[in-house]
Structures are given as C-alpha cells and as structure tokens.
Image (cartoon, helix red, strand yellow):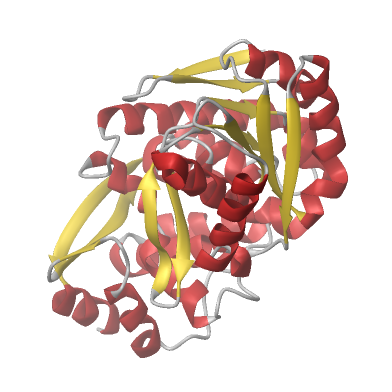
Amino acid sequence: MKKIRINTSSPYNVHIERGSLYQSGRLISEILKSKKAVIVTDDTVDKLYSDILINSLNENEISADVFVFPHGEQSKNLHTLGDIFNFLCEKGITRSDFLIALGGGVVGDITGFAAASFLRGIDFVQIPTTLLSQVDSSVGGKTAVDIPGGKNLVGAFKQPALVICDSDTLRTLPESELACGMAEVIKYGMIRDKNLFEMCENHDMSNIHDVMDEIVYTCVDIKRQVVENDEFDKGERMILNFGHTLGHAIEGWHNYTDYTHGMGVATGMCMITRRFCGADIAERLEKCAEAYKLPVSTEAPMSELLPFCAKDKKCESSSISYIVCPEIGSADIRKVSVGDFFALMEG
C-alpha cells in the first residue's frame, strides 16, 4: 500500500492499493467515529461496487444507505443536489455522520458539494473509481455542480476526510472512460513531470494498466505539491487548468453530452500548445493524445467557443488566465484581458 498525506487546512490521507475497496470499512473506521453514512453513486457504479462497499462498512459496524442517480455530466446539477439533500433528511443524517462518494468525477463533485452544504458541513470520503477521479478530481477539495450559465460555477472548497484509490476498479472502465482519465495524466506530465509524460508516450491503451499504480501515485503526489502551495486556487494551482479553458468551452458547445471532460481537456491542451508553443512540443503532445484515442482538434468554430470562455470561473473581472507549457514538464500562467485573449485565439 502507498499512502500520501495531503497537508491542507484539513489534512487527510490518500490510500493507493489494489483491492482497497474491500478494506474501505476498516480504513474509514480508523479516522471517523460515526457509524452511519450515506453512499452517493451513479447507476453504473452502483451495480459494480455498492455491495462490496456496504459489506465492508457493515463488517466494521457502519450502516449505510445508498443514493443513486443517473450517470453522466448532465446529472451534476442543482436538481440532483436537491434530491441528495432530501434523501439525507429522510435518512436522518446528522452533523456527526458522513457521506461517501463512490464513483467518478461527477459523483465526487456533487457529493463533496453536498457535504460542504448540508447542515453547513459534514465529513465525506472519496472512493474514486475512474482514472480521472483517482489522479485528479478526488484530491484537492474542489466541489461543484453545473448550471445553465456554465460548468462548475456553483460549488465550494471541501477537503475529504479520506481518499481510497483501488486501481483494480479501473479495469472495469470502458475504453472511452480510461482515455478520459489519460487526458489528465498527460496534463500532469506536461505541466510538471517530463518522465511521466514520457511514460505515457511509451505506452498506449493496450498496456497502460501495467504502470497504473505508478501513474496514480505520481499524479496524486504532483497534485499534493500544488494544492499544499495554493489550496484555494489563487496562484500556482492554476497550472492544473492546462487545457481546461478551451476544454470546458468545447464541452459546453457540445451541451455536455457527446464530449467528455477528458476529450475537452485533450483538445484544449493541443489547441493552446499548437498556438503558443514550438511545433515539436505540439507534435509530441498530439501523438501522445492520439495513442489514447483522444481528439486533438474540434469542429466547433472559435467564434462560438470564446463566449463560453468568458463565462468560465477562471475569469476575474475583465481578465482571463490560461496555461501554456513552453517545454514538457513546466507550465506558465498567463493573464490577459478577455478581449486580448479573444484576439490571440482568433488571430
């Protein structure tokens, strides 16, 4: 087992071990005293892993009810959040009880926001079951839901009490979902770790599971360093948004339906790199993304993407921040006026 300590305002551990889902009840009982929980998950993950988690909790004298919602980004909204709140009321959840997010990034985001909001804050545990959520969204405390005005515009910072990463759960992912997570892995290599990027280059969809434990550990450790330096996203943490300014816009242009977050991030990284960096870096990035069957361009017109960028949470007043990797393994934060950003992207 590997363990990483995240020293934020509310410190917690990330456990990385194959088969740890079966030990989740013991791991949770070691840090939380409550014997009552609600598991929040989606209809896909529920069929695969809810019974395993419930059995492990029960073995450690923790009772749990399960709230299940339809999978997909379309469910990460205020309506689903309201349904979760009503379910917690029905089950008599108190401030001393806790939530468990069992699933991918959507589940983690909405469960974390529910935990931050319900009764003005209760504990929650992250058990991420997708590559994207294990390497990125389960760590760092960002929680949110989408509204018609944009993605992740309503949320809160809420650090989990514990994160449990079982890489065995990644073997049940469809190829498209695995690819989605690899976009974030490639991002971490681009912004901070050349060796990680080269590991991605030297593998593909056929053999990436051979190095999955190392990938998850490396990405979580990179995020630990960044989050500890800038917990509330005011400075260095912005480098984690490489590819996201345009990526979120592309997702929005597709109405968050047929274009996953990972596809958006991959395309956004490639578009920014192609425009602002050397051809050799852009070619390596695009080749790496394509090895994991990720898109590197979009049919969406730039003139239609830019209005989405203007609504993005990375905007401050009349300025916008975007991330550029001048070389593989390092990142720069660039801040310009929204108008200048539009001119740069349309030029």
Foreground residue among 72 and 223: 72
Instruction: Please provide percent x and percent y for residue 324.
Output: 30, 55
Q: Is residue 71 left or right of residue 297?
A: right
What residue do we see at 52% from left, 35% from top?
196
Taking the image as drawn, is residue 51 in sight? yes
Total count of labels:
0
Taking the image as drawn, is residue 186 in sight? no
Q: Quadrant of residue 346?
A: bottom left
What residue do we see at 86% from left, 44% from top?
48
Instruction: Please provide percent x and percent y for residue 313.
Output: 30, 62
Q: Is residue 313 positioned above or below 68 on the image?
A: below
Q: Is residue 315 left or right of residue 167?
A: left
Q: Is residue 312 positioned above or below 89 on the image?
A: below
What residue do we see at 15% from left, 79% from top?
339
Instruction: Please provide percent x and percent y for residue 153.
Output: 37, 63
Foreground residue among 226 and 345: 226
Outermost residue to the top: 30
Q: Quadrant of residue 321?
A: bottom left
Q: In which quarter of the image is residue 164?
A: top right
What residue do we see at 73% from left, 63% from top?
70
